Image (cartoon, rainbow, N blue to C red):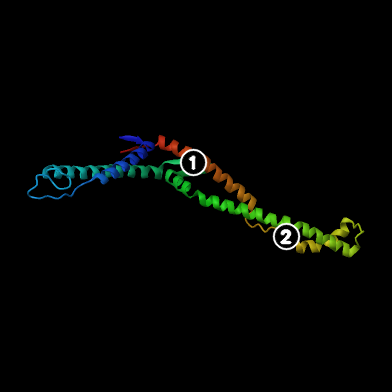
Amino acid sequence: MEISLTRALAEIKMLDAQISERIVELQVVDLEQEKMSVLMISKKTKDQFVKDAKASMQSIDDLISNRLKIKKALVRANATAKIKIGEDEYTIAEAIERKKSIDVEVQLLNTLIYQHSNANSVIDRQKPKLDEAVQNLVNTSLGKEAKPTDEAFKVITGSFIKQNELRMVDPVSILENIAKRKGVIEEFKKNIDFLLSEVNASTKIDI
């Protein structure tokens, strides 16, 4: 019989519930006394208990076997059926795994954003202090009332600014890195559930 992956997932969920329920209800051991016509726990005759116990065990084994059969077919399909998100292609299994682990990528993205923002904040906080120090240097060199030309200002302050100005060291091109990662993550999260539902509905397996 051919069914969709969506149907297979529903069947597995239903089988899981049935197996659990029947295991809870399972009774395959009882106690007897020669003088009693029924068994102590089940209150059934011995013949009826033996018949019911064997049937219950067989029923559970059949459910487990059916679940395993569907699960195997589902795993095979998940390893072969593919979806495309953005520029990346995934098998269903790969897409499900990435969906589970995407939080790690989000954590990395947030770290990059924080470090870039923090570095800029430190630079911004230092700038007024640097400007003040530069002005003091000019005043000391030329006097408070002096109005140096741009060229003179550079001669007096250039070396000082170069030595004291904070500059971001950015070996990974962080803004470009952030933009790329953010786009990939947003594209994936926006489309993954819909595409998985779509492929699960359209992909068939034989059971």
Q: Is residue 57 above or below residue 118?
A: above
Residue at x 41%, y 35% (from the top left corner):
201
Percent position (x, y) of residue 146? 92, 59
C-alpha distance separating marks 2 and 1? 42 Å
Q: Which mark is residue 192?
A: 1
Q: Position of residue 36 (x, y in %)?
A: 9, 47
Residue that numbered label 2 is attached to: 166
- Of 137 and 175, nearer the camera is 137
Q: Position of residue 178 (x, y in %)?
A: 61, 49
Q: Nearer the viewer, residue 5 or 60?
A: 60
In the image, residue 159 above or below residue 45: below
Secondary structure of residue under mark 2: loop
Residue 106 place in picture, x, y as percent: 54, 50
Q: Amino acid at mark 2?
A: Leu
* Mark 2–mark 1 CB contact (< 8 Å): no
User: Is 26 placed left or right of 190 in the picture?
Assistant: left
Q: In which quadrant is the N terminus drawn?
A: top left
Give me the disc on residue 113.
none
Q: Quadrant of the C terminus?
A: top left
Residue sitting at x 59%, y 47%? 180
195 over 94 or under it: above or below:
above
Within 10 Å of the Cα at label 2, are there few (<14), some (14-19), or many (20+) other Cα atoms?
Answer: some
